[in-house]
Image (spheres, rainbow, N blue to C red):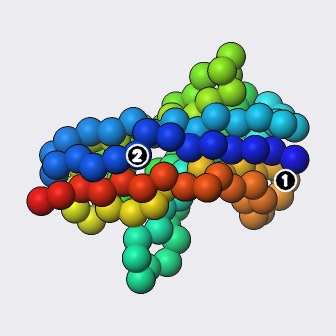
Amino acid sequence: QVQLVESGGGLVQAGGSLRLSCAASGRTFSSDTMGWFRQAPGKEREFVASILWNRDSTDYGDSVKDRFTISRDNAKNTVYLQMNSLQPEDTAVYYCAARRYGVRQYGYWGQGTQVTVSS
């Protein structure tokens, strides 16, 4: 099992920045992919970004490219999401997730952290 705990959400004005953290514990593997997703009220869950623990390989959703940056600290088993130039449409609950190597679906999820961007 993998436990994921997000933190860092909050209220920010448009144009501001936030950094989310995701602390992973339990049976984590260096080959896991770590991802960030978000879900706004009345909308489907949306992929935000992903990173591998053991390679500098990242991927981003189109709506956050060039504004958000995903990174990791292997020593702390923590993944970060730096969010810049935030806009009201970025308002959502942000979830951290983990996916085993060779598995298509993310099987482990955190409880989520709320990000609210005011105009």
Provide residue 83's location: percent of width, then percent of height.
34, 42
Q: Amino acid at mark 1?
A: Gly
Q: Which residue is mark 1?
A: 102
Provide residue 76's location: percent of width, then percent of height.
66, 21
Is 49 positioned to the left or the right of 56 in the image?
A: left
How would you rate the neighbour count of disc 2 (Cα within 10 Å): few for under 14, some for 14-19, many for 20 or more? some
Is 51 positioned to the left or the right of 109 in the image?
A: left
Looking at the rendered image, the disc whose residue lies closer to the viewer, 2 or 1, is 2
> Which quadrant of the figure has residue 79?
top right
Provide residue 73's location: percent of width, then percent of height.
60, 22
Residue at image coords 48%, 52%: 113
Residue that sits furthest to the left in the current view: 119
Do labels 2 and 1 touch, CB within 8 Å?
no
Is 24 positioned to the left or the right of 26 in the image?
A: left
Q: Amino acid at mark 2?
A: Gly
Q: Which residue is mark 2?
A: 9
Q: Is residue 31 something one can see in this rendering?
A: no
> N-terminal of the two: label 2 or label 1?
2
Residue that sits furthest to the bottom in the current view: 42
How would you rate the neighbour count of disc 1 (Cα within 10 Å): few for under 14, some for 14-19, many for 20 or more? few
Element marked by disc 2 = loop
> Which quadrant of the figure has residue 116?
bottom left
Which numbered circle lies on residue 39? none
Q: CA distance from mark 2 to mark 1?
A: 31 Å
Q: 110 and 104: which one is in front?
A: 110
Residue at image coords 81%, 49%: 100
Q: Is residue 30 something one can see in this rendering?
A: yes
Residue at image coords 58%, 39%: 22
> Which quadrant of the figure has residue 33?
top right
